[in-house]
């Protein structure tokens, strides 16, 4: 193993930590310098008694094909203490610091009325993995319109709205359905009459699409007999007249009734 030694003679902050017997722990962020580069990891000097290891998979949130294009001897940055092994081997991360800074920048935005466009990067059984501004979000299928769930376009950007942000866990819940609702909300007027297309028929009612919003007309709104076969009256694709009786802006849903 060949290690190229840097010109970095000492780390004043590291010496200060040693002077006061500070015990470095997981999740600390310390400034350091790269002193060597191997095929699978880089060697980092944080001014501590031991050299730290930066796995190349912890280099960046972005996909890096050639680490040497980004790293060089005497490269200086802040490093996240990822793990301290039993043998006192210290593992650090650059992408964790990047993630923290991106998250803090994201928190400064006004989420109330903001719609973002995120790229779907992975298709999972219960949802999709989307990326926005370098951060990854998992979106449940229930929060994605069926049109977007059916497509396999790898370069698809779709609208999302933030539902909830949990700072302590760096978790955000986002919904494409709510974003689509926000875009058409101004065109949905209470007590107004609209034409909707039937998209599916169930035992308990019919689902109808109005301006891209999927709504349910419960069987109790259609007939007094709860055991009636609705396919005897409707079929998929039929257009029927409906009245909007309420809007739930937070959940991105509307309540409708048949226009008689």
Image (cartoon, rainbow, N blue to C red):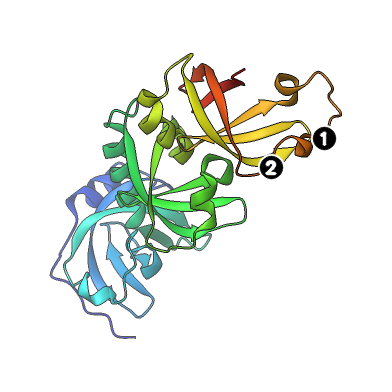
How far separated are the C-alphas under marks 1 and 2?
11 Å
Q: Give how far across and how far down residue 62 sits, in percent.
A: 32, 62
Q: Residue at x 45, y 40 (%)?
A: 176
Q: Quick one: label 1 or label 2, which is nearer the N terminus?
A: 1
Q: Residue at x 58, y 41 (%)?
A: 142
Disc on res. 129: none
Is residue 219 or residue 242 the one in the foreground? 242
Q: Which label is found at residue 235?
A: 2
Q: Secondary structure at mark 2?
A: loop
Residue 8 drawn at (x, y percent):
15, 65
Front residue of this view, candidates 102 and 186: 186
Q: Which residue is mark 1?
A: 229
Image quadrant in which the C terminus is located:
top right
Left or right: 124 as drawn, with respect to 108: right
Whether residue 153 is situated above or below residue 159 in the rendered picture: below
Q: Secondary structure at mark 1?
A: loop
Q: Residue 128, how many percent across, how many down?
A: 51, 52
């Amino acid at each position: 193993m060949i290690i190229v030694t840097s010109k970095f003679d000492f780390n004043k902050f590291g010496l200060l930590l040693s002077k006061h017997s500070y015990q470095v722990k997981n999740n600390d962020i310390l400034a350091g310098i790269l002193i060597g580069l191997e095929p699978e990891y880089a060697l980092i000097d944080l001014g501590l008694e031991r050299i730290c290891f930066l796995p190349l998979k912890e280099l960046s949130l972005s996909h890096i094909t050639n680490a040497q294009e980004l790293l060089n001897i005497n490269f200086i940055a802040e490093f996240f203490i990822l793990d301290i092994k039993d043998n006192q081997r210290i593992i650090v991360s650059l992408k964790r610091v990047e993630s923290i800074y991106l998250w803090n920048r994201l928190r400064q935005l006004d989420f109330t009325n903001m719609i973002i466009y995120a790229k779907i990067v992975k298709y999972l059984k219960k949802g999709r993995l989307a990326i926005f501004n370098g951060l990854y979000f998992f979106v449940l299928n229930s929060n994605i319109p069926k049109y977007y769930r059916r497509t396999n376009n790898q370069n698809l950007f779709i609208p999302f709205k933030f539902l909830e942000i949990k700072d302590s866990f760096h978790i955000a819940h986002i919904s494409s359905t709510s974003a689509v609702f926000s875009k058409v909300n101004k065109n949905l007027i209470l007590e107004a009459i609209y034409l909707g297309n039937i998209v599916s028929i169930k035992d308990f009612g019919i689902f109808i699409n109005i301006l891209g919003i999927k709504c349910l007309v419960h069987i109790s709104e259609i007939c007094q007999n709860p055991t009636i076969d609705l396919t005897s009256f409707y079929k998929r694709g039929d257009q029927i007249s409906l009245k909007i009786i309420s809007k739930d802006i937070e959940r991105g849903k509307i309540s409708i009734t048949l226009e008689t």
